[in-house]
Every structure is written in C-alpha cells, then in structure tokens.
Image (spheres, rainbow, N blue to C red):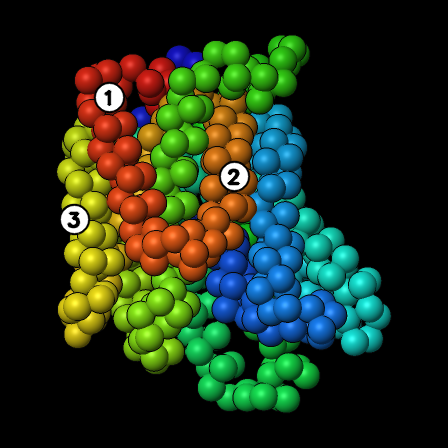
Amino acid sequence: MTHLVDPLIKHRNLNTHDYKTLALSSLGGALEFYDFIIFVFFSLVIGHLFFPPDMPEWLSQIQTFGIFAAGYIIRPFGGIVMAHFGDLLGRKKMFTLSILLMALPTLLIGLLPTYATIGYAAPILLLLMRLCQGLAVGGEVPGAWTFVAEHVPKNRIGVACGILTSGLSLGILFGSLISMLINTLFIGEAMTSWGWRIPFFIGGIFGFLAMYLRRWLKETPVFIEMQQQKSNEKNKQLPVLSVLKNYLPQALLSMLLTWILSAGIMVVILMTPIYLQKQFDFSAIESSQSNTLAIIGLIISCTVYGALADKFPIGKVLIYGCIIAVVTITCFYFSLENYRHFLFITYPLAGLGIGVVGAFAYFMVKAFPTNIRYSGVSFSFNMAYAIAGGITPLLLSVFTDFFNKLAPAFYVISLFSLGAIIGVMLLLSSNNYFAKDM
C-alpha cells in the first residue's frame, strides 16, 4: 500500500471524533471484563445453584470455573471467524455483531433456571451461554484495537490503544462496584433466589445499549482505501493463513505479550480480592477498597504507557515498564504477611506498575499489515488468552491452596520479567517486526 489516507499519515492531536470513536470502541471490551468479574465474584453462588446440593463445595467450584474456562477455550475459533470477515467485509460490521453476541448470553444467564428446577440441564445451559460469549468476545478486543488504530493519526496510535485498554479496566471497576453493591443489598435467601441475577441483567442491558450507540461509528478509512485498491483483485488466501505463513514471529511475540497482559489483569486485579481474603484474612471491605484503588492506578498508567509508546521505542518502554512492574508486584505480594498495614499503598502501586500492558496493543496493531491486521491481532490475542485465561484461575487456586500461597506472585513476576526480555529483543531489532504500512 503506497498511499494511505489522512488519518494514518498526518501527525496531529486526537480530536473530538477520535475520542468519540475511542469511547464507543471501549464499550465492548468493558462489557467483556465486566462479565468476567461478576462471574468470578458470584462463582460461589453459581456453583451452589447450578450443581447438586450434595456435591462438595470444592468440586462445584472446580466445575464452575471449568464452565467459565470453556468460554476462553472456544474464543480462538470465534476470533478467527470474526477477524476473517472483518478483514474481508469491514471492521464495523463484525465489531457490531460481536457485542450483540456478548450481550444476549449475558442477559440469558440471568434468566436461567437452576439445578433445583431443571436438574443437570441447568449447568449444560450455563455452559452453552459461556460458549456463546466466548465465540463473541474472540473478535471484540482485537477488533477494538484494530478499529481505533486505523482511525486515529499515526503518531497517536499508542495513546489511543492505551486509552482503549484503560476502558477495559473501567469494565472491571464497574463490575467490582456492582458486585459490592449487590453483596451489600442482598444477603442469604435474597441473594440465592434472585439477587445474583441482577448483575447479569445489567450486563445484558449495557451490551444492547453499547450496540445501539455503535451505529454511529464509521468504517475505518484505512480499510476503505485498501478495499478500493484491491477492488479488482481476488483474495487467494485466508487472512489467518497469511498470518501463519508470513508473520509467524510477530504472532508469537504478540501471544507472549498477551500472556503477560492476562497475568497482570487477571491475577493482580481480578483474582486478588478473593486471594487477600482467603490467604491473608483481609476483610471483604479492605480487599474491595484496595482493589478499587489498584484498578484506578491501572486505568491511569495504561494511558500513560500508551502515550510513551508514541514518544519512545516500544522496546525501551517495555524494558523499563516491565522492570517497574516486577518491583511493584514484588513489594505488594511480599508485604502482605508482615506489612499488611501497607496494603492501601502497595496494591495501588502494583496497579500502576502493571499498566505497562497498555502499550502492548501498540506493538500488535503495528506488527501486521492492513489486509490481515484484524486476523493477526485476533489470532495472537485469542490463542494466548484461551490458554492463559482459561487455566490460570484454576491452576493458581490449586497451587496456592496446596503448595505455596505466594504462587501468584512468582507467576506474575516471572511473566513480567519475560516482558523485559521481549523489550530488549525489540529494541535490538530496530522495528523490524513492524509492518511496512504502519
């Protein structure tokens, strides 16, 4: 591609249209992480209601997390299909479809009958809803990153992707606040009878609202010009096959970065409130309040690191950012036993530290050319997230309970150390991993 349209070649600041695109693009990712956190926070209630009452609590929890993991395992298939048509037919069409397919199952989970009503059909229906969600979310976050990267000016791709990643964190914050509110208002019978359903109703309504608002989005100018240039050409190869054949190193690096991202957000942010209560006897209020501060820190630093990616080589940003993450994560986890009164300092600092993940999307969207960008980002992100996102909660729960309660710390520290190594490699490569049209 020799001549790209204005939004990708002009150096300018983000304007009102860019911020509107960012806001509307963030809604789907926010819904995904909202759905994650309410499922985890209400997993005890769900396990109690959707499995036989005489089943041991640990077994019902494992099966509940297994159903949850199924949504992650199937997401690569949904991501590949949606990205394929997104590269061929347009980003906006698949972008709108994905949020519809996310919102509907979320709403239906809130309407599902329980084991007491329909027996084993209850967990089967719950599994089916999770699979539908997994198919949809496979195209959502990669689609959002691709969409905004092709809308904003070239010199603002980093901050745009950082803001978008911050938007995902807003979904976590919203889910955390809703969960706290529901747990405060509904106790005992009120919770098990219908209180647990309310967060899923809210998520479904939120999703349909987001889908309605997205009708104001326009197709990316980069995709439109690409279609005009190849209007007389036939697409001879599936986009995902082109990714594997011609951009395998970029895909592997993107998968590793996704693995690190999943560890930072899933372990440090999403799983930690329950971890603090079970392993270190913090109260639910202390855990929730400190977690809220950590999420706010993550939101701020994702944007900051995205902006830094626009100013400095991405390798350098990863090196310093991941080292800072290792230091703050170490301080947080290893202070919980003997310096627990520092929780409201160390946990927010850990949230700030892992915000380097806000710069990861900058590399992913620049690693693949326009004609396969959606497929490249989607394949890499979803394959890694399916494995890491699906098995991490279960494995860390087992290792923490039976081997070492600091297992989450060692896991996350190791991965962010890997991030620094990737940064060194990218710094030495002099941007050889970037596509020529980016």
- Which residue is painted at 47% across and 86% down in the image? 184
* Nearer-N-terminus badge (3/1): 3
Q: Label 1 neighbourhood size at 10 Å, few (<14), some (14-19), many (20+)? A: some
Q: Which of the two marks, 3 or 1, is nearer to us in this view?
A: 3
The residue tagged with tag 1: helix, strand or loop? Answer: helix
- Residue name at image x 32 percent, y 62 percent: 295
Relative height, residue 168 to residue 180 (above, below): above
The vertical placement of 394 against 198, above or below, is above
User: At which x and y percent is residue 297?
Assistant: 25, 60
Crowd rating for badge 3 (residues with CA inside 10 Å; few <14, some 14–19, many 20+) = some
Between circles 2 and 1, the one closer to the viewer is: 2
Residue 279 picture location, percent across and down: 35, 67
Give the SS element for disc 3.
Answer: helix
The answer to whether 315 appears left or right of 79 in the picture is: left
Asked whether the residues under the numbered discs 3 and 2 touch, taking CB atoms below 8 Å apart as contact, a structural biologist would say no
Q: Is residue 387 above or below residue 296?
A: above
Q: Nearer the viewer, residue 84 or 128?
A: 128
Identify the residue position indicated by label 2 in the image.
387
Q: State the image quarter where residue 318 is shown.
A: top left
- Residue position marked by numbered label 3 in the rendering: 327
**From mark 2 to mark 1, how far is it between C-alphas?**
24 Å
The answer to whether 169 appears left or right of 206 in the picture is left
Res 47 visible: no
Q: Residue at x 63, y 48 (%)?
A: 70
Q: Which badge, 3 or 2, comes first in the chain's sequence?
A: 3
Relative to 24, is 260 above or below? above
Q: Amino acid at mark 1?
A: Met
Which label is found at residue 103? none
Q: Amino acid at mark 2?
A: Ile
* Residue marked by disc 1: 425
**Mark 2, secondary structure of its residue:** helix
